[in-house]
Image (cartoon, grey):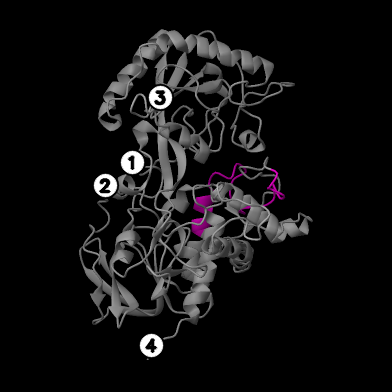
Amino acid sequence: MTNDSVAPRESARPAARSAADAEADVVVVGGGGAGLPAALFSRWLGNEVVLLEKAAELGGTAKKAAFWYWVPNNEAMRALGIEDRFEDFLRYVARLSQPTRYDPARADAGLSEWELSMVRAIYDSAAPAAELLRDRGALTYRHCPDVPDYWSQLPEDKAPTGRVLVPADARESMSDGGVCAVRQMSAAAERDGVDVRTGHRVQRLILDSGRVAGVEATTAGGRTVRVLARKGVVFATGGFTHDDELRRNHLSVPAYRGCAASTNEGDFVRIAAGVGAQLGNMNYAWMCPVPLERSGRPDLVGMFSVAGDSTIFVDRHGRRVANEKMPYNEAAQTFFQWDPAEGGYPNLVLVQIWDQRSQDHSASDEYGRLIVPPGADDSHVIRADTLEELTERIRERLAANAGRTGGFTLADDFAANLPATIERFNGFARAGKDADFARGETPIELVFNGPVKDEPGRANPTMWPISDTGPYYAALVTGGTLDTKGGPRTDADGRVLDDLGEPIPGLFGVGNCVASASGRAYWAGGATLGPILAFAHRAASAVDRAAVPA
């Protein structure tokens, strides 16, 4: 992928220390949801901080997110008397992250020593980090006491609601939280004296006697800038969503480019390799459905919420294959199911189909929903007056995208099966119970349902019969990454580890550019950003304690 506003990637081979253009106690690389808090925490400890951002503006992926942040045992929970013990929190996250090793009878719940230390760090530090940001006016929040975890129905989740916080000035739907959070943290960085430099792509580390002593960056104009760090360098550069080579080589599924910032190209994976960093969790990502035809666009927002009650997803045979209202990370797994008999991914592209009712009552420009209001970009939408005509237009649209899908097309029986699929779904909708996929039976599915027409007394607000008459609408959907969650492995204080598990002096990492202890799991809304705040706080404290070379 080409980013015209940033310098191209150069060799990541480390450079020796030489004359510098700038020097600070701490250099933070990346100005998004991890880099901004890391810079603020470092500055508040009295350090001189330079923040280098590759893009022309701050925010990264966080600016496109709702910025829910998941904070166990937070102050607002405690004020409401909601108990959230570490032992319970541990069992919940371990059950999801490592289900084949999970053992509730063990003190570590079956996690490795490293995983356990990381989970403990999240529990211990996310709340203090959130409170410090609030108290300093850098990220004020409001509590969302009724928002459930994504797996709140599991018996291991003893605190199924109450862990979610959002920026205080976000709209009621919470969809613009990222814009609000970045605005607040950016203003605090300027107020408190963080030296922010945008348009600086960090290319490599500067080494001094085996210690990371700074970085070399290239400006959009091609100038090389050397910035030394007396205490350490903190990378917060996001994952490798937009590097096709890294994504294809490391992810175990054919995930498409998702809604991470277009500058998330895995820079830290290559940079840290030059100093022998250990990699971890490279095969997993935070996943979501994405509109096939928008994959790779910088304005893409993943489908956090599938709106509409009279809507379904169907496969190439015209059959439903999954619960459309599942949390997005789980819904994305449907696209990656391998058929050993066919030798392919039969669900690589699914078709969302809806009727005029959902178009009229469920259109929204929030959370990446594909049913959009008049005036919004609807280039992804396919329209027809009949199901037969809709089928032909879906075939045409798939043919136009054949180069991106390996020639994926509808099966010959799609047109014959689709009416029967709709009839079966309509029977479930009238009864209020989805006998095939249990749609609408977990608390989080109701949260993600989106706007629908009010129907007093109905048992299941996620379903309504699809109309017998057109017009009908459709869109092509596939699986993509919000961002990846693998990279150099760190300890619980953000220190990057070498191949023997020893910290690399002067090098730290936070966020999606480093290995997540979550494994494949997505514990809850904000389970990316809450832990990121915790590790930003811990890394800032650790780099502050680092010895300054004589």
| Residue 61: in magenta span | no
Q: Is residue 503 above or below residue 370?
A: below
How many neighbours does mark 1 have within 10 angstroms: few (below 14), some (14-19), or many (20 or more)?
A: many
Q: 343 left or right of 321?
A: left
**Mark 2 element type:** loop
Q: Nearer the viewer, residue 412 or 163?
A: 412
Q: Nearer the viewer, residue 273 or 195?
A: 273
Residue 77, percent from left and from top: 72, 56
Q: Which residues are magenta?
A: 155-183
Q: State if disc 1 and disc 3 touch (CB < 8 Å).
A: no
Q: 69 left or right of 143?
A: left
Three-letter amino acid code at the position of disc 4: Pro
Name the residue tied to disc 1. 296
How many neighbours does mark 3 have within 10 angstroms: few (below 14), some (14-19), or many (20 or more)?
A: some
**Mark 1 element type:** loop
Residue at horizontal 35%, vertical 52%? 240
Q: Is residue 502 above or below residue 120?
A: below
How many neighbours does mark 4 have within 10 angstroms: few (below 14), some (14-19), or many (20 or more)?
A: few
Q: How many marks?
A: 4
| Residue 156: in magenta span | yes
How far is the residue under mark 3 from the one under mark 4? Answer: 59 Å
How many neighbours does mark 2 have within 10 angstroms: few (below 14), some (14-19), or many (20 or more)?
A: few
Q: State if disc 2 and disc 3 touch (CB < 8 Å).
A: no
Three-letter amino acid code at the position of disc 1: Gly
Name the residue tied to disc 2. 1
